Amino acid sequence: MAELMNCPNCGALFVKTNIRDVCEKCFKEEEVAFETVYKFIRKKENRTATIFETSEGTGVAEELIIKFIRTGKLKLAQFPNLGYPCQTCHTIIREGILCDDCSNKFRSELSAFQKEEERKKELKERNKGTYFADKNF
Ligand SMILES: [Zn+2]
Ligand SMILES: [Zn+2]
């Protein structure tokens, strides 16, 4: 179903589709930017460029290049140093949303959090018991 929305780039009203989340004008601009990025990165001497170097070399904003990568438009397979920043520490990663370090940290924090929650629950249950026990006295 067609959905009318404001373009996140320029605010113009447009019909949102599955492949397009910006207005016609911005979409065309993104296409041009993509061509520029792709032409740049395909050059042998630029194959190993990072996202920062690519942005510098093309004048295309990093965020837009990141969008190309995230949406799968720009395939990372051929470009060993291209990636996008981890959401937490901005290390360049090539898949997921967090780098290895952060996802390990996140996982251990999560399990620590879960343990803490378990402990709190246990404590609460025990206190409840004590409370009733006290009352009975
Ligand atoms: Zn627009
Ligand atoms: Zn990270």
Image (tube, rainbow, N blue to C red):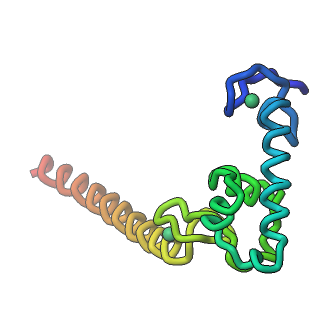
Q: Horizontal placement of 107 versus 16: left or right?
A: left
Q: Nearer the viewer, residue 18 or 45?
A: 45
Q: Position of residue 117 (x, y in %)?
A: 37, 60
- Specify the quadrant of the image occupied by residue 11: top right
Residue at the extreme left: 137
Q: Can you tell which quarter of the image residue 130 is in?
A: bottom left
Q: Position of residue 105 (x, y in %)?
A: 45, 73
Q: Quick check: 41 above or below 21?
A: below
Image: 26 above or below 137 = above
**Residue at left 62%, top 71%?**
93
Determine the residue positioned at 90% across, 27% down.
1
Identify the residue at horizontal 14%, vertical 49% (top origin).
136
Residue at the spot 34% in from the left edge and 58% down from the top edge:
121
Between residue 62 and residue 114, name the one nearer to us.
Answer: 62
Please count the marks in the image. Answer: 0
Observer-nearest of 130 and 30: 30
Name the spot of residue 42 as percent of width and height, x first.
84, 71
Decide: is 42 above or below 137.
below
Given residues 54 and 24, the one toward you in this image is: 54
Residue 66 position within the rendered picture, expressed as x and y whole percent measured from the top left: 68, 57
Q: Is residue 107 left or right of residue 124?
A: right
In the picture as drawn, the residue positioned furthest to the right comes out as 1
Residue 100 shown left or right of residue 115 in the figure: right
Look at the picture and state if 133 lies above or below 54. above
